[in-house]
Structures are given as C-alpha cells and as structure tokens.
Image (cartoon, rainbow, N blue to C red):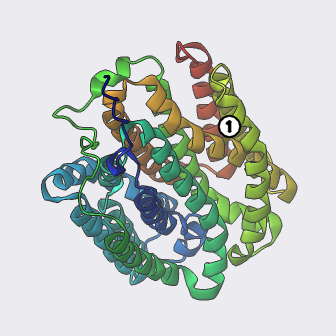
Amino acid sequence: MNTPTPKTEATPQDQPNWRAVGALSGVFALRMLGIFMVFPVLAVWAADLPDATPALIGLALGVYGITQALFQIPMGALSDRFGRRRIIVAGLLIFAAGGLVAASAETIWGVIAGRALQGAGAIAAAITALVADITPARFRTRAMAVIGASIGGAFGLSMVLGPLLEGLIGVPGIFLLTAVLGIAAAGWLLLTVPRGAPNGAPAATGQGGRLGLDLFRQPGFTGLTMGIFMLHMVLTAGFVILPGLLRDSTGLAVSGHWQIYLPVLIAAVLCMVPMVLKAERGTRAHGMVLLALAQVAAGLAVMAFANSSAWPVIAGLWLFFIGFTFMEAHLPARVSQVVPEDRRGAALGLYSTAQFLGAFVGGAGGGLFLGFTNIPTTLGLAAALMTLWLLLMATACRPRNS
C-alpha cells in the first residue's frame, strides 16, 4: 500500500505582506513629497531672501542630495543593528526637524541648513531593507516596483501641490507642512508595518561588508547609474531656472503654475506608458532608454531657445517630462535585471547614491553657472550634457541583453 505524498501548502511566510509594502511605499512617498514640493516654487521665493544668489539658491534646492548620499549607508547599517522601524522613524523625525528649520529661516543660509537636515534623514536603504525583510525573494522586484511607482507619483503630485500651496500658505508654510508629513509618516509606519522579518529574508541594505564597486564591471550597470546621476542633475538644475522662466514666459504667478504642470504631466505620462510597455518586452529596452534621453535633451534645448515664449517653453517641458518619467519608472527595474540577484541590494544602494549626488551637483552647479551666464546658456549646457550622454549610451554603454 502506497503512502500518499502530503501536499505542500504555501505558508504565510511564502507570501508577501502587501499591506506593509503599501504602507512603506506611502511612507517613502510622503517623504519625497516633502522634498519635491518646494522644487517648483523655491527659486522665485528664495531670490528675495537676504544673502541670496543664484549659486546659493541652487545649493538650497540640491543640498539635500549630498547629505542624503552621505547618510544613506550609515543609516542602513544602523538599521541592521537597531532595527528597521526605529531607524526609519528616526530618519523621518530628522526630516521633520529640517522642515521646521527651513520654515523659520530668515536668510538663504537657514533654508540651506534646513534642506541639508532634511536630506540627513536618509531612509532609502532602511526602507529597501525592510521591504526585503517582509517580502519573499520571488516577489521582491514587484515590491520594489511599488516603491518606485509611489515615488514617481509623489513627484507628479508635488508639481501640482507646490504652486497651489504656495498661493495658500507660502513657501514657509510648505516647509512646515513637510515637517507634519514627516511626523505623520512616522506614525503611519508604527501603526501599519510589522517589527520583524517574517520571511527570514536577508537584509538588503546592499552593504554585505563591501561597497559593491565591482558592480561597475557589470555590463550595463555603469550606464544606468550614470544615467540616473545625469537625469537628476539636469532636473535640479532645471528647477533653479524653471519657476522664473514660466513666470516670465506665461505671465502666471508661481501660485498659478499648477495650471501648466498638471496638463503637461498628464500628457507626458500618456506618452510615457507605451514606452514602458515596449521596454518590458526586453529587446526594445535599450532603444526606449535612448529615446527618453533624446526627449530630455530636446526638451531642454527647446526651452533654451524659446526666447521666453510661452508655448515653446511648455512644449519643451512636456518633452522633458516624457523622458524623465520614463527613466524614473524604468531604470530601477533595469538595474535589478543587469546585476546578479544576490547583489541587487548593493546595486540599488549605489544607484540611489548616484541619484542623490546628481541632485546636489545639479542644484549647486546649475545655480553657480547661472550666476555667471544666463538662462538660455545654462539650459543649453544641460541639453549638451544630456546629448553627450545619449551618444555614449548609444555606443559604449549598451547592455549585452538589452
């Protein structure tokens, strides 16, 4: 008589905790909303502050990137020792404190200090690790995509909310609101995310005792990492210029710029979605990246030569956002595809660091360059840099399995 083989049933440990993943994506989105909401309004408001110069305004916009890059690895390591939730909550409270400092600033230096403190509450590595802790390996890429989508949504929402709120509560009020968002996110985390790591997954801070610099020998990884650096460099440099450019070309006050951002972003996303679908087929992924880079470069060039005319500026902004939203959605997934599975944590850590450094270089460098030249020259330089990167990606950085 044969003994029947017992059926193997899926245990709760084999299933992702989508409720917790959703909560973590919400926490991350609230923090990034606080970072991005001042992008469309800061440059014009800060120009009236004591000691303000284009270089210091750019620094105020992008300084969060350098502190976020510097503190990401230490905060990730501390989460290994003291627990993910504690470190994420601590980072959110540091972020909230930065918002309070910036809200009470009376000079540009106070805004710089507040933004730097906001960046020091670096929780990206700890959140990524906690997502890995609560998600089985086979669901991890999907969970990371949820996090990425929430960040993209936060960026789009901030482009609309920033100008709207500027008209209602002013930029100091927006900074105060970011502090409230940080505290709210900390409370949400404590209420919705479990303490432990039910799936027994390895920590995913991406350190593993080494920095992972050998990953730059991985085909395709260098191009993707430098791509996100360049993308956030031109994004932050662009927002040193864009609020004033939109005001002068359209005649709209900054508080009315949401009327431009909202339709432009909707139109950009509608054009971006087919690109993402084509990229997911695998063989067209690299071609879609090149197309997105061309769109970003073309958008910057159109704005550079717009001569302060409204429709060319809006058209350039639309082209820029098509390429930008595609790259934001697609590049993290490509990174996880071109590196070994057991090195994804390290790869995403390096990728995020490059992104934050790009924001710092773009803000500081864009403001400094603008102080010596003018808006068309600064935008033209950004377009030239993206064109150069497009040519390099088309020739030297093509992945083997693109």
Quadrant for the N terminus, please: top left
The relative height of residue 93 versus residue 140 in the rendered view (above or below) is below
Q: Is residue 96 left or right of residue 320?
A: left
Comparing 327 with 366, the one in front is 327
The percent coordinates of residue 19 (x first, y second) are 45, 61
**Left or right of 202, for residue 106:** right
Q: Is residue 114 above or below residue 123?
A: below
* Residue 10 visible, this orientation: yes
**Residue 288 occupies quadrant:** top right
Taking the spot 72% from the left edge, 70% from the top edge, the residue there is: 258
- Snapshot quadrant of residue 96: bottom left
| Count of numbered circles in the view | 1
Depth check, front residue: 74 or 132: 132
Q: Name the residue type under label 1.
A: Val
What is the residue that sits farthest to the left in this orientation?
81
Q: How far from the left and from the top, in percent, is residue 369?
A: 53, 48
Q: Secondary structure at mark 1?
A: helix
Can residue 371 be seen in this snapshot? no
Please tell me in which quadrant of the rendered image residue 212 appears: top left
* Residue at image coords 58%, 33%: 385
Q: Position of residue 342 (x, y in %)?
A: 31, 29
Query: What residue is disc 1 on?
Result: 276
- Dot 1, how many residues are within 10 Å of its Cα: few (below 14), some (14-19), or many (20+)? some
134 horizontally vs 258: left or right:
left
Residue 5's x, y, as percent? Answer: 34, 29
Write the residue at 51% across / 45% down: 145
Position of residue 257 in the picture relative to residue 138 (left or right)? right
> For this rendering, which residue is in front, 123 or 295?
123
View extreme (front): residue: 1
- In the rendered image of this protein, does residue 348 appear above or below residue 59? above
User: Dividing the image into 4 quarters, which one contains the C terminus?
Assistant: top right
